[in-house]
Amino acid sequence: MHSTSSINSIPCRAFRTLDANSSEMTRREVVNAKKKILRKAGVYRDPNRARNDSRKEIAYLRQQMDKLQIDLKSLEDRRKRRMQQQERLSEHLIVVYSAPQILNMWQVIAEKQRQRREEAERENARLKLIAERQQKAADSLSSLLKKRENQSMNDCASFMDVSPRQRIVHVVDFHGDISRVSSDIMTLLDEK
C-alpha cells in the first residue's frame, strides 16, 4: 500500500489536500463539510423539502379531518335532538286540537282551493273566447286574400295573349286595387 507521503506527492487533483483543522482532507470533503455547516445554518434549502412539506400537509389534513368529523358528529346529534323535539311537539299539538277545529281548518283550505279553481276556469273560458275570435279573424283575412289573389290572377289573365307566336304580357297599374283591398279588410274587421 501507499503511504501518506507517497499520496501527497501524487499530482492528482482529487487527492490534493488542504489543511483544515490540522487534518488531511480532500477538497471535496472540505466543500461537503462547508455545505453541511451552511445547510444547518439555513443558507441552503433542505434537499428533502418536498417530501417534508407533503408530510406536514398530510399531518395538517389529518388534523382537519378529525376536527371536521367531530363537527359532523355534533351537527348530527343536534339534528337528531331537534327532530325528536319536533316529534314531541307535533304529538302534543295533535292532542291539543280537537276534532271540530281540525274539520274547520280543512273546510277553510277546501274553500280556498275551490275559489282558485273557479277563477282558473273563468280565465280559461275568457282566453278560449279570445283565441276563437282571433282564429275567425285570421280565417276570414286568409279567405279574403285568396279571393283577391284569384281575382287579380283572372284580371291579369285577360291581358295575356295566349297565342303561341306572341308572348306579350300587357301590364296594368293596380294602385287603385290596393286602396280597395285595404278598405275591404277594414270593413271585415269592423264587422267582427
Image (tube, grey):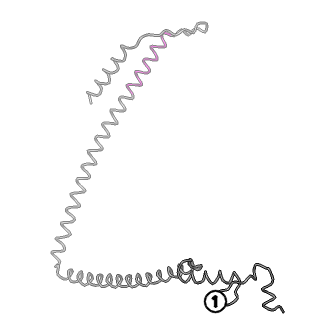
Tell me if 139 is positioned left or right of 7 in this view: left
Front-most of residues 156 and 45: 45
Which residue is depicted at the point 53% across and 82% down?
Answer: 41
Expressed as whole percent of the image width and height from the top left, the position of residue 174 reads 40, 13
Query: Which of the 4 image quadrants contains residue 104?
Result: bottom left
> Which stretch did the figure color magenta?
143-159
Asked which secondary structure carries label 1, the reply is loop
Name the amino acid, label 1: Asn
Expressed as whole percent of the image width and height from the top left, the position of residue 3 reads 81, 92
Label 1 packing within 10 angstroms: few (<14), some (14-19), many (20+): few
Query: Which of the 4 image quadrants contains residue 10?
Result: bottom right
Residue lying farthest right?
A: 1
For label 1, the residue is 21
Which residue is depicted at the point 23% across and 57% down?
Answer: 116
Which residue is depicted at the point 33% across and 84% down?
Answer: 80
Is the stretch drawn in magenta largely helix, strand or loop? helix
In the picture, the quarter occupied by the N terminus is bottom right
Expressed as whole percent of the image width and height from the top left, the position of residue 110 reads 22, 64
Tell me if 69 is positioned left or right of 26 in this view: left
Expressed as whole percent of the image width and height from the top left, the position of residue 60 reads 46, 81
Front-most of residues 171 and 159: 171
Q: Is residue 111 above or below residue 57?
A: above
In the picture, the quarter occupied by the C terminus is top left
Tell me if 91 is positioned left or right of 150 in this view: left
Task: Indicate whether residue 127 is drawn in magenta.
Answer: no
Q: Is residue 19 above or below residue 149?
A: below
Task: Indicate whether residue 158 is drawn in magenta.
Answer: yes
Which residue is depicted at the point 44% across and 20% down?
Answer: 150
Query: Which of the 4 image quadrants contains residue 107?
Result: bottom left
